[in-house]
Structure formats: C-alpha cells, structure tokens
Amino acid sequence: MDFLTVVKCMAALALVSLMFWMGLKAKFEDVLSRSKNPKLLAIGCLANFVLVPMFTLGLLHVFSPGSMVSVGLLILAVCPGAPVGLPFVAIARGDVAFAISQMIILSTLSVLFSPLLLGILLNYWFQDDDLVIDYLAVMQTLFLIQILPLGLGFLLHHFTPVFAERSMNTLGIISNLLLIATVILILMAEYETLIRIRFQDWLGMMIMYLGCLGLGWICGGSSRRFRNTFSITTGVRNAAIALVIVSNNFPGTPAVATVVAQSLLGIIGGVIFALFLGAMPDARTSHDS
C-alpha cells in the first residue's frame, strides 16, 4: 500500500468516524424541534450552497490563483456541515442543538448538491480546459462514508441512549485525532507544494474564510445566539469531505495542498473567532429570534 492510498484511507476513515459521532451525539427531540423552523434551515442552505460558492467565484475573479488552487477553493466552497465546528459553536455560546440539526441536514443534502454545484462551478471556471471528475463516484462515495455512518449513529443514539452517552466523548476524541493525523500526513506529503503557494493565494484563502464568517453572521439575523451559530457553521468548511473529494480526484496536485491550507486557516480561525464571540458581554443574554 503506497503513501497516497494510506492518506485516502485515513481521510475516508476520519469522515466516517466524524459522521458517526455526529449522529451518535444528536438527540432526536432536539433535532426535530430545531427542524421545525423552515426559515432558519432555508437560510442555512442558502448561505452554504449559494452565497459561499458565489462569493468564492468572485474571489477567484479578483485574485486569479493557479488552476489547481482554484479547484481546491471551489471544492471547499461546496462542502458545508463540518462536525469540527460544533465545539466552536459551544465556545461561542451559540445554539449547539440547532448547529447539530443544521449540520445533519447540510451533510445529507451535500451528497446531492455538492457534486452538482462542483460540476457547475468547474465547468464555469474552466470552460476551455479538459478537467475530468467523476461526479457520480463522488455522490456514491459521500453516501457511503457520510450518510450511512450518520444514519447508523443517529439510530444507535435513539435506540441505545446509554451506549451513546458513554461512548460519544471517546469517539469524538478519536474522530478528531484521525482528522488531525490525516492533515499531518498530507502536510508531510504536500510540504513542498504548500511552501510554493503564493502570498496572493494565501491572502485569497484568508479573505474567503472571513467572507464565509461574514455571510453566516449576516444570515443569522438579529439574534446574537443564531448569528454566532450561523457564522461558525458557515465559516468552517467541511475539510473531511473536501479531503476525500480532492485526494480521490486530484491527487498530488496543489488542489490538495490548498484544501489542507484553507482547512488549517478555518480551524485556527474558528477557535480564535469562537473565543472572541464567547467573550462578548451580551453573548449570554441574547434572545432567540
């Protein structure tokens, strides 16, 4: 088994573990109660599947990065619902139950919409290039390693709540360690590519992250609690899904390094931003909209 295969397997295993953990963590009554507000759910879908991709396209027009860097950013733009954002929502004093509900819905919809949107964006941006990606295979992969473990975790939590309560913390630690290990392996493999990323591209990635946070903040409305939740769930893109897609379709290219670099910015920035939001004096006293 070569190094690239190991990285692909680690990325897939990390995603399976994260989705199973998210399903195991979800309480049916909490998810159901938060899902009764179609307006908020629709806004979340609008922000993640429409506004973020459009904003990313605008950035590409301004910064004109290399072709594979553009591919990496577009892949991240269509990958919402990052489970690693849940601790950030808690730190920021957002609505964790709503964040879980939204991430479950976004992760489920992404099986269909992420490949579809990626195809539209890549065809638009690379009109004259022969860029090949197997979109059906992407959908099948996302279903197998995202929806199935999510559903299994959800069912186990519903029928065996004691087991879920005892195991979710341990599984959460294991899942995040697997994701960190995957990122470290890719950093080792893509180190030379990472150091060759231009300052202009780094600047574009930073603006993309800040822009996604801003879009989520605006979509959160007047409630500080939902603003905090939306900004983080929109700003932190799903690195696990993006790594699976990019490592299977564009291995050994700057697209992989771009996904890793942007993901690191999202995680580090997510911690800092969540601490800032949580420290704001009125974060405790805001009311739901």
Image: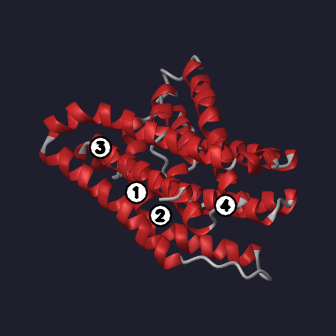
Sooner in the amino-acid sequence: mark 4 or mark 1: 1
Left or right: 134 with respect to 126? left
Mark found first going from the N terminus, 3 or 4: 3
Residues marked 1 and 2 touching at CB (< 8 Å): no
Q: Measuring from the top left, give residue 119's x and y in whole percent.
A: 61, 75
The label shown at residue 252 is: 4
Q: Marks 2/3: CA distance?
A: 19 Å
User: In the structure shown, which secondary structural element does the residue marked by tag 3 occupy?
Assistant: loop
Going by the numbered disc 1, the residue's amino acid type is: Ile
Residue at which label 2 appears: 110
User: Is disc 4 surrounded by few (<14), some (14 to 19) or many (20+) residues within 10 Å?
Assistant: some
- Which class describes the residues within 10 Å of circle 3: few (<14), some (14-19), or many (20+)? many
Q: Which residue position holds label 3?
A: 26
Mark count = 4
Query: Where in the figure is residue 30, as x and y percent of width and height?
Result: 28, 42
Q: Amino acid at mark 4?
A: Gly
Gap between marks 3 and 4, in whole Å?
36 Å
Find numbered disc 2 in the image and state the secondary structure of the residue it sits on: helix
Residue shown at 64%/76% (left/top)?
A: 120
Q: Which mark is residue 105?
A: 1
Viewer-nearest of labels 1 and 2? 2
| Observer able to see residue 215 | no
